[in-house]
Image (tube, coloured by chain):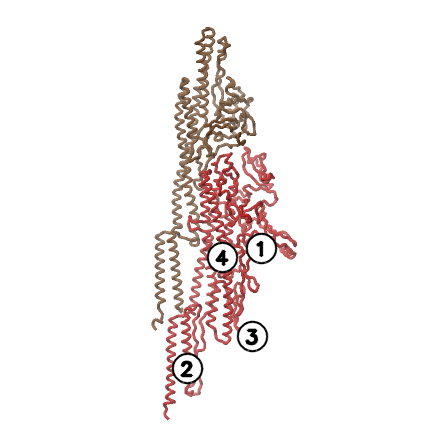
Chain colours: A red, B brown
Amino acid sequence: MPSSFFGLTIGASGVSTYDALLNVTAHNISNTKTEGYARQSTVQKAKEAISLGASYGMVGAGSEAIDVVNTRDAYYDYKYRKSNAVLGYYENAVYYMDSIQDHLYSPDSESAGLSNSLNRFFDALTNLTTDPTNTTIRAQVTGYADTLATYANEMFYNLQQMQDDINSQISNTVDEINSYGMQIASLTKQISTLEVYGSRANDLRDQRAVILDKLAKLADIDVVELPPAEGKGIAQFIVNLGGGVLVDTNTYNTIHTVTAKTFDNQTDADGLYSLQWSNGQMFGIRNTKLGGKLQALFEIRDGNNGENFKSELQDTYSAGDKKLKMYVPASNVESGASLAKLNIPASDGIIDIQNFEFEYESFEVKIDIKGNYTYEFTLKDALTATDALNLNNLLGAGKVEASIGDAVEYRGIPYYMSQLNEFLRTFTATFNQAQNKGYDLNGDKGVDLFKAKDITSGEGLNMTEFLKNTRDGYYYLNGCKVLTSTEFATYTTDATKFDVSKQVRLNDENGVPTEYYELYDKDNNLVETVYRATDSTNIFSFKSTAAKGDTVSYYNMTAKYMLTNQDLVKDGKLLACAAKDPKTKTGIAEGQNLAVMAGLQSDEDMFKQGNPISFLQVMTATVGVDSKKVIAAEKNSQNIVDAVGNRRLATMGVDEDEEAQNLVEAQNLLNAQYKVISVMNEVLDKLINGMGL
Amino acid sequence: MRVTNTMISNSARSHISGAKNKLLKYEEQYTSQKKIQRPSDDPTVAVRSLKLRTTYSQLTQYVEKNVKDAMDWMDATETAMENIGSLITNMKGYFNQGANDSYESGDRNSILSALKQYDRSIFEDEANSDYAGRYVFTGYRTDTPLLFMEDKTNLSYKITEEFKYDNIRSTTAVLGGATYNSSFTNGQAYVDQAPTTKKIYHLMTAYDDCSNVNNSGDGATTDAFSITAKDKLGNDVALGANNIKVAKSTDDDKIRDVQPDEVRYLYDTGEILIGETVYQTIQANQATLSVDYCKDKFLKEDIRPEMYFKCSAHDSISGKDIKYAKPDDQQIRYEINFSQTLSVNTQARDAVSLEMHRTIDYIEKCIEYVDEVEAQMTETKKMIDNENDKDKKAVLESLQGTLEEEKKLRQKVLTEAFGMGLTALDNTQQTLSVAVAELGAKYKRAQLTHDKLLDQRTDTEENLSDNEDVSLTDVYINLSQADNLYQASLSSTAKILGNSLLNYI
């Protein structure tokens, strides 16, 4: 027989159990809109029965609430964070690709744009064929050339501005990551402290999960929770990011931006960041598993389609050497080492030779008649004995690859800048070559219409055109066919074409003989001017830091430094429309050279892609298709995040209807408990006060 | 699956945002009238747009400017050439009159002055015409008139003129002739002086009043005159001219008596006389002759040599030497279609031959000779009338007889000269017709190109519009649909979110 008050105790246990249920329900209802909140529920069970040895056996002791648990599912958390990292990547990629597209493409033929400026320039040239003597149309042509150059400069500044913006975005993102890391560590500390006593800190865990969700969008994370290790009282909670440890239970690492003093690409903005962990470890910014916003930012800031400079180290070295020699065979130059595509910085670049790094101050390039390139880099610091030994050992073991800049397999800002430069270099060189061949209205030889800006003086430099003619296979230096001395001997003595006795060797402005030769036919007509290469191997060389007076190659012609020769802009008469001196030889309306220049618009051999517009078309298609791809991927990953999020909500979300139901039920049940107590009370009352003695 | 209110509200939110995105897209299309704003909207459209815009802008340039300009230029040329044609036709009658009748001095001179007027008109009014300030017949020298606009004494030219073997004409030269000599007492003395005729071979260079000194500053040679020949294959031909004589037509009355192995150049009249042997060599080889001669003095309205011939000049004021290239093939080419050019100009040297112009000079010279003889005859007649001495009268009458004979010969030469004028006129007309026909063909081509370009431009405009412009109907329907979708998503959300179990408890 149990205690007479036992029933009252059972009633009390029911009250406390359903009180807990009511409170949890109220907690759920009040957190319906709390971000990341997982529905909680009480776990209740019947209290242990008491064995009284009575005839009816065990007596139940009521109920008790033993735990409050939440319904968070670790699998969906994992899935959600992984897909959120993908979404974070594409969201940012879409944003910046849109900006790149806006700079490269104009939605109609009226607005400013590279292809529109180019069309206007060529229209004016075509117009000029109707009257080469018309100074108004001439001024129009040079005016449009100026617009073209200004537009190229503007495009460059827009792209570089974007690169700068992305760079500060990287810094902001890193700050955000650091702040999240700190919060996670601090929450983990609180959770561990609370959970030491055995219960789960559900709400703190929810808070931490929300931060992890947000962090996952910035970069892909791996979250590991380990039960307390042997001899340690608390559970371990580790967050890995980008190959490093961001949070280790109560402690966290931070990431720092490091301003680079060197450059990866010729036209990179100053002071781009790389990252470093607070523990001194390098942060792998090129890690393709980095994921999230951070990876998108780095790829768009640095993406060069994997076309970094790759060459083969040559020579043997000794301590104190300041120069490294590298070689790129003609078959490989098109991947980024050719004159039109060369995108390495003129100075302050880093040469990577199998993980040995050397900073260079400048370089010089020599090109031989077969199109092989030899690069000679002048190092900032002379080689130490160890350096020399290392290099010689490598060279002894076989081919040694030397690269400059990272290969980033994404078409980001550096890629489009380099495309722009390639376009401008080839286009301006071809145009200048044509312009140099003709005569202007004053009867003088045509001068360069497009020039590269001298960085120190700001003046235009006199350019040296070095182009390969794909039709006849010869190289042309300043418009003159380049011949080796052996070729020269056979070429110039061809009696069907030239009269050798009339050959003239040209002098420079100081009267010193040059290697340019004028070849005449029997009737004393100038057939062509050729250049005889004197160097037994190399036919053209240039310095990265060419200034006034040096041979200025089209390496210096970039969207940033492109100029229109202001002499021509001011005086259209200097446009070289005539093939022969119009003052004395023919007449001012002769426009044979103009026809050549206007014909460049449809010169299918100018680029691998075809004529100038074709090149821009391919560029537009590339940026369009790439953007379309990321836009589709963004939509897709948004859908995945939504779906995973919904699945997660299906388990952990609070449902108002459900909770309303729980609320009513809890209320009723609680009332029932009160009834139990009241009944028990009545029974006891009767027993104690009513049983008359 | 358990569905919670948040899931419904999330899904509603994403549907509303999807509907809004669509609305934004069609609203952008509706207001900008363009299908795409960025290449990623549709890379194919973007790329095609670039190409079509370039093509459209080129076509517009061709059709609205270049072809039109070409046709205007050719119109100006054609008008001038038509005028020249009718002038030439008008001249024919005068040459015919001269060739068929012998006239009195006054008539001869009026025919001559009419011919000269027409000739001047051909060169000064027509061949010198311009289109919008650009001379049309002067090749690349559109800034320079065909003729000298003022007398030029500071320019010394050396001119290289080319002739073909069949340009050489056979004419009759009158050699000798009697003049009054007071010491003659015998009529026979005059009879002995009676003029003879000789068939000679004769070329007219483009200029008279030339120089016997080379002041052109052309260092190659200082000769005032030289002649070389090449055969059909371009090999040099030795003319066998042992004697090249530079003289004036008035030096001697037998100056035209050219010897078989001789070439004589009369620099005042610009005639080249070729001896029989030399002539035969030229004919046997069907040779092309290249003649260099010099001229120092140009009068207003003289033709600038560089327009017709290869030449070099020395300017005695500036001290400059200019070497003019051979002016052939100075085609002003307009780009009228994609990598298609049309040469719009006609050069004077191809349209207006100098042959007739110089033949008129020759006729003038012949008339001068006849006039001279007639003047002498009038003089002699007076002397006969005043002479009383019978013997002396007989001597004078003998002179008169000889002069009569000379006049006949000279008149024959003059008639022959008018005949030559007719041939020259035919040749000139022929040259002009060829030039007119050529221009007509080119004009036709320009016209066809214009029509074709116009069609192409319309097509391209349509393509361009199809490619990048939205169809208003389509986009309006799309916009309305998007709007409906948006409204629907709003109303369904409002309906769902408004309800909960709590409403019923």
Q: Chain of mark 2?
A: A
Disc 1 crowd rating (10 Å Cα; few below 14, some 14-19, many 20+) is many
Please state which amino acid type lies under the numbered disc 1: Ile
Q: Earlier in the sequence, mark 4 or mark 3?
A: 4
Residue topped by disc 2? A12
Left or right, A133 with reference to B497: right
Residue topped by disc 1? A350
Q: CA distance from mark 1 to mark 2?
A: 78 Å
Position in image of residue A651 (x %, y %) = 43, 69
Please state which amino acid type lies under the numbered disc 2: Ala
Is residue B160 depicted above or below B467 in this figure?
above
Is residue B401 depicted above or below A132 in this figure?
above
Q: CA distance from mark 2 to mark 4?
A: 66 Å
| Quarter containing the C terminus of chain B | bottom left
Between A420 and B154, the residue placed more toward the observer is B154
Position in image of residue B24 (x %, y %) = 39, 57
Q: Secondary structure at mark 4?
A: helix
- The reply to whether discs 1 and 3 touch (Cβ–Cβ < 8 Å) is no
Quarter-of-image position of residue B115: top left
Count the marks.
Answer: 4
